[in-house]
Image: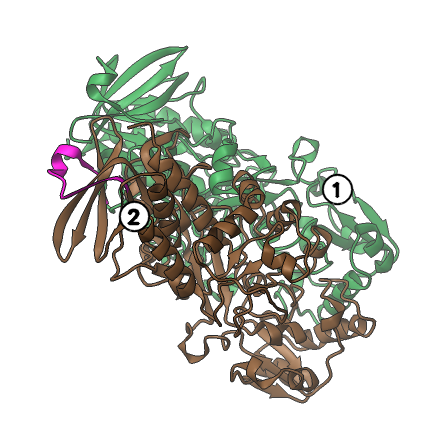
Chain colours: A green, B brown
Amino acid sequence: MEPVGLREAGPADHECDVLVVGFGAAGAAAAHEAAGAGADVLVLERAGGPGGTSAQSGGELYLGGGTEIQKACGFDDTPDDMYAYLEAALGPHPDTAKLRLYCDESVEHFEWLRARGVPFKASLYETPTWMPPTDDGLMWLGENAWPFTEIARPAPRGHRPAAPLFAGRVLMDALSSAATGAGAVAHRDTQAANLILDDDGRVAGAVARRYGKRVVYRARRAVVLTTGGFVDNDDMLRDHAPVLLGHGKVSDGLDDGSGIRMAAAIGAATRRMGEVEVALAALPVLVARGMLVDALGRRFINEDVYPGRFSHHAVRHQPGPYWAIIDEEGFDQIPEPDLWGVRPKHAAETLAEMEESLGMPPGSLANTVEVYNRHAAHGEDPYFHKDPRWLRPLRGPFAAFDPGDGFWGSGGPASGVSGFTLGGLHTDLDGAVLNHSGARIPGLYAAGRASHGIHGEGYVSGTSLGDGTFFGRRAGRAAARDATA
Amino acid sequence: MEPVGLREAGPADHECDVLVVGFGAAGAAAAHEAAGAGADVLVLERAGGPGGTSAQSGGELYLGGGTEIQKACGFDDTPDDMYAYLEAALGPHPDTAKLRLYCDESVEHFEWLRARGVPFKASLYETPTWMPPTDDGLMWLGENAWPFTEIARPAPRGHRPAAPLFAGRVLMDALSSAATGAGAVAHRDTQAANLILDDDGRVAGAVARRYGKRVVYRARRAVVLTTGGFVDNDDMLRDHAPVLLGHGKVSDGLDDGSGIRMAAAIGAATRRMGEVEVALAALPVLVARGMLVDALGRRFINEDVYPGRFSHHAVRHQPGPYWAIIDEEGFDQIPEPDLWGVRPKHAAETLAEMEESLGMPPGSLANTVEVYNRHAAHGEDPYFHKDPRWLRPLRGPFAAFDPGDGFWGSGGPASGVSGFTLGGLHTDLDGAVLNHSGARIPGLYAAGRASHGIHGEGYVSGTSLGDGTFFGRRAGRAAARDATA
């Protein structure tokens, strides 16, 4: 992790203008733009091919402000509405400067993605879900749930490459082809281990390992770190984001924070290292029709929000275990395919029985349901303002679902929770990495989850691939024209 | 903040074996032990005299395992009970290695403090409070509240120098006199700005400013950073602990994270930069007799816990504003001096009126009180297990107190919340600062809030002065014998 000097590094095995470390979505975007600006670009990828965690994701990109897909689906949207929603949903305390730019230029970014060959179908998937089982190009990501309905005009902004479920591979195939098509050259099975510093403290390349051999890469203009987050590194989780310890990891298994550590070792600043995305496996369609309660039988959120939001509120703020409670009538309304084979953990005729099964204080769940039903009978939810279309008094028999049983089925994490990290290197709007005095470190850029992006405490699907590709592009362009060399 | 080389630094104005930066409690402890080990010690303090935030605090030291004061007050205690309590109360995810050592050697640390002239009176202050108005030497810090009563045998471990309220000055006078008495020399009005690195990357001193002049300090063995946390630096709060933005600052006004940044600039690792202590001004004696509710009229904790704990749960996990609700009978039981002049913000005959005054959903507070009363009538609290001595059905008329109106009165922060930071440099058990590869940075130590100590997400009064002095001593001894020079 510690840096090496130019002389210590020895002769370069490879030279380039811009060295991109990591060939996920952010790296592909950076490599494409740097190459397009005329730079000689090398991309290092420690796996056997491009893709990284991006390729294994749902592929959602949070885009809006009036894209062609939004228009074709009948939605008006503006950058201001997009900004207002994200400022609240990613908050408190998102990076407002990055967020403003991200929203103002979102339509352009959508067009850039489409021009790179990412396919988007002009159709909306309406049902609450983590990932649509269809190839629809647009989905809601919480914009139509309270309190956001009062903050910004709702429009769906989840843009998806045209593929069912895990569409990230479609995105990555397009972006990696675009990068190499623009002239970037990829070296696979190659892991950067140390940054090279010249005598003036400028980043001048990296020392890597490839098939057990040391390989020296000299970068004449800049190095761009797009190495991902650190969810696969339990030591780093312990130091910075212990809330994810013991949970599942949303990653390709290689998100060990190497880029963050290489840069921090030369005095790079980091931001928000404790912020994380967390997801309960819970089926949103089931949760929305019933109620989500904590270990004390208490509701804590409107269940029709984006599932990442109810997951975050549960894991960060409520005592577990959590339970999705539904009645027979609600359960029967869910089409079988939408249940993914998930079955109740407990069933009971009365709430007293259910409390006993779930180890809740006597009367607790009954009290919650009584209050819920009293208001639901009038289509109201004065506590959390769930949309009336999901409100209906619940009547026995009741079923309780473990929100750990969900989308991922038996292949999911034992805790029912999985996540990834949002904190990383402190960068400016051009992706330049800053030191602890707030100055740019000459020759060093970062994007994607190696950096801190637009996020505050909150997270919405599509904002990680979104800010990774958006600021990856900016980092690639800035690196190509880096004048500090 | 950025480091300077030995040659760049120029001739030394002052030389010493061990340079301690910051003359609060951790710095005094480090300086004393380094001087006692035979080192030539200089201590830099940017203010006009020793003390720092430590001198302006309540002066509590979390000590136990069977101190003389505990025994004299009739309590048996063991290091294992102390560890079990702190592991839970400072958790989740405290630093267990540091915590184990801290508990195992706590009696010795108490004796060391007493031998340095810190006066402890052998009497217990029994009432829940932030700071006793007496000179009693022992106080409860949450050990006798659920769930800790089931985790460890309760014993009070808050050890206080013999002075009413803010006893930190008594502590600091003793420790700073002990340090200079042992031979350490203090340079006041002197602010370290950059670490000096020799050609091998070893920390060899610091460049400071004094009355506008640059002063070069050469340290032959080591530098110990005891510069405090970063609550006074809004940029650092924004980057690492935004939850404290806009709240009051528990500090001497100089906790700007300078030591953390100087060290991070040379590649030092940090830990848990987002963890904080937060305190509502709320009067614990009032909260314990009534109930603490959030913006939705919900209880969320047993109100008889250490007030830092109910504050943390409120600020970190519940929607505000928060309210302390009490009835006339409970209010009348509180002796006038214990009220500190605090008066209700709202009063109402019925809970429906109160809900309207407080902007809560109709029926919400009434539901909470109904459930509370039903169980309190039997001396029970099945949700949060408040001790029966504080349980009694609440009957109108009711009063609501803003927990921002409390101990600090009109001099407190507008938000009613104040706090300080718990994250900092990553150190080992000897206070040596580690780099991002987990190796010691030669010649660099840290203690107190410039470092990450024993804390996880939780905090208990006395553990900051406690771990600061304990690991400050270890850092001073290790610095004095540093063999890497």
Asked if B151 appears above or below A27 in the picture, the reply is: below
Task: Answer few, some or many: residues within 10 Å of disc 1's Cα (few below 14, many 20 plus, some between 14 and 19).
Answer: few
Q: CA separation, marks 2 and 1?
A: 79 Å
Q: Nearer the viewer, residue A457 or B259?
A: B259
Q: How many marks?
A: 2
Please tell me in which quadrant of the rendered image residue B394 appears: bottom right
Q: Quadrant of residue A404?
A: top right
Quarter of the image that includes the C terminus of chain B? top left
| Magenta residue check for B14 | yes
Q: Give yes or no for contact between labels 2 and 1 (Cβ–Cβ under 8 Å).
A: no
Give the answer, above or below, for where B481 lies relative to B421.
above
Residue at the spot x=73%, y=58% of the render?
A297
Q: Position of residue A163 (x, y in %)?
A: 54, 33
Q: Is residue B183 left or right of residue A49?
A: left
> Against B270, is B161 above or below?
below
Residue mark closest to the camera, 2 vs 1 = 2
| x and y, in percent, of residue A68 in the image | 40, 47
**Left or right: B253, with A203 as reference point:** right
The answer to whether any part of residue A180 appears in the image is no
Asked whether B96 or A6 is in front, the reply is: B96
Q: Position of residue B49 (x, y in %)?
A: 27, 61
Q: Nearer the viewer, residue B31 or A98?
A: B31
Disc 2: which residue = B183
Mark drawn on residue B375: none
Magenta span covers which residues? B1-18
Q: Quadrant of the N terminus of chain B?
A: top left
Q: Which residue is mark 1?
A: A336
Q: Is residue B312 visible?
A: yes
**A276 or A170: nearer the eye?**
A276
Could you tell me the amino acid type at mark 2?
Gly
